[in-house]
Image (cartoon, helix red, strand yellow):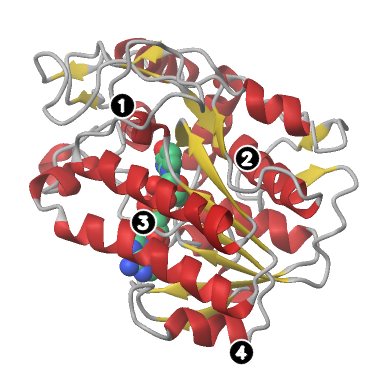
Amino acid sequence: MDSGGRAVEAVELRPGAEPRFRAAGATELAGRAVLVTGADGLLGSWLVGALLRRGARAVTIRRDDRAVSALALLGLADRVDVVHGDICTEGLLARTIGEYDVDSVFHLAAQTLVGPANKAPLSTFETNIRGTWLVLEACRAHGVERVVVASSDKAYGRQDALPYRETQPLQAIYPYDVSKAAGDLIARSYWHTFGLPVAVTRFANLYGGADTHRSRLIPEAVSAALSGRAPVIRSDGSPERDFLYVEDAVAAYLAIWEALGRGQGRGEAFNAGDGKPHNVRELVSLICRLAGSSVEPDIRGAGVPAGEIDRQWVDASKLRALTGWEPAVTLEEGLRRTIEWYRAHPAARVPAPAERSETPAVLD
Ligand SMILES: NC(=O)c1ccc[n+]([C@@H]2O[C@H](COP(=O)([O-])OP(=O)(O)OC[C@H]3O[C@@H](n4cnc5c(N)ncnc54)[C@H](O)[C@@H]3O)[C@@H](O)[C@H]2O)c1
């Protein structure tokens, strides 16, 4: 549903076609210049598609030119204004916001992988914490009208009570999780202290086409199933997570952006997920079945990997109550779309473990 309680129409993704997503009546974005940090990533690329379809101008800051880019895979690469650099470069954000006349910011750029964060945390802390305050400070200095900052369900850390609710304290203890908790607190301080209209998202694990991270579970499992090889699971398959289809996540971001425009949600955090935990082994088996493959998961771990939490899922009722948002795509349907996307884009598939150096199938 969109913010007005109207049905969100998620249009079937045809193999090879640009994804289309419409929320009825969302015309408020037309003509606005919107900065999406991290637009080359999974969520950012789909969000850019949604913004462009609503007539917004999308601007991003690109640090890395990667061989496989999500924006390019979605056919959007030449429709975005790109400022080259690192969000941590002093002055770059202020220049971008000023010169491109940005009035709204979706801050998604982050070092998002748990494995690298646990091996060497400094780049994670640098981008996810310092990068976040630099974004916020530039927004404050330039009077940006609305800011949505990506935190994560990981910011909650280990909790006795599940699903996570926004009222629970942030108890992160591992580097990636701590970096998101710190950015989350800093972002909300900008509303409470400086009146910057900012809201924070704490979403579940996202998935969909055009995820170019080879170490993530769903790209690995889908690629493996489509190639007829056994998907590698790094844990023992028992960890439980909540999975949110990327277009549903985009709809939630737009609903929060609309709420900010109505003067709601400022200084607040919002969960989104499909509210049902699934264990990794069952998820991978479901992917294999939906892909029409008889391969069995290759379970390589014993227990939960170090630096990760065994069970995580969120309660999204706060966001639903404020905006009417709820997931429009079931897990099966989202996985079907993801499988079809990777079927149509073989170059984006994760190669077999022997052909690459990364440790596969992490639960980021
Ligand atoms: N993917 C998930 O399951 C998930 C779940 C909850 C929250 N989140 C959060 O949502 C946001 C988007 O996630 P995603 O999966 O799309 O991420 P992603 O890793 O796919 O994309 C992140 C993008 O940020 C860019 N980036 C990183 N450091 C940068 C820097 N210093 N300067 C400029 N650009 C930089 C990367 O190059 C990349 O394009 C992140 O903040 C993440 O923490 C993700």
Q: Which residue is mark 4?
A: 99
How many other residues sit within 10 Å of disc 4, few (<14), some (14-19) or many (≥20)?
few
Are the residues flagged by discs 1 and 2 in contact, CB closer than 8 Å? no
Q: In this rendering, which labeled residue sits more in front, label 4 or label 1?
A: 4
Are the residues flagged by discs 3 and 4 in contact, CB closer than 8 Å? no
Confirm if mark 3 falls within 8 A of ligand 1.
yes
Q: Which residue is mark 1?
A: 228
Q: Which residue is mark 3?
A: 110
Cα distance, mark 3 to mark 4?
Answer: 23 Å
Give me the residue at 41% from left, 71% from top. Answer: 134
Q: Which quadrant would residue 5 be assigned to in this image?
A: top right
Q: Which residue is mark 2?
A: 247
Amino acid residing under circle 3: Ala
> Which numbered disc, 2 or 3, marks the residue that appears first in the sequence?
3
In the image: residue 108, left or right of residue 324 = left
Residue at the farthest front position: 193
Cα distance, mark 2 to mark 3?
Answer: 19 Å
> Which numbered disc, 3 or 1, marks the residue that appears first in the sequence?
3
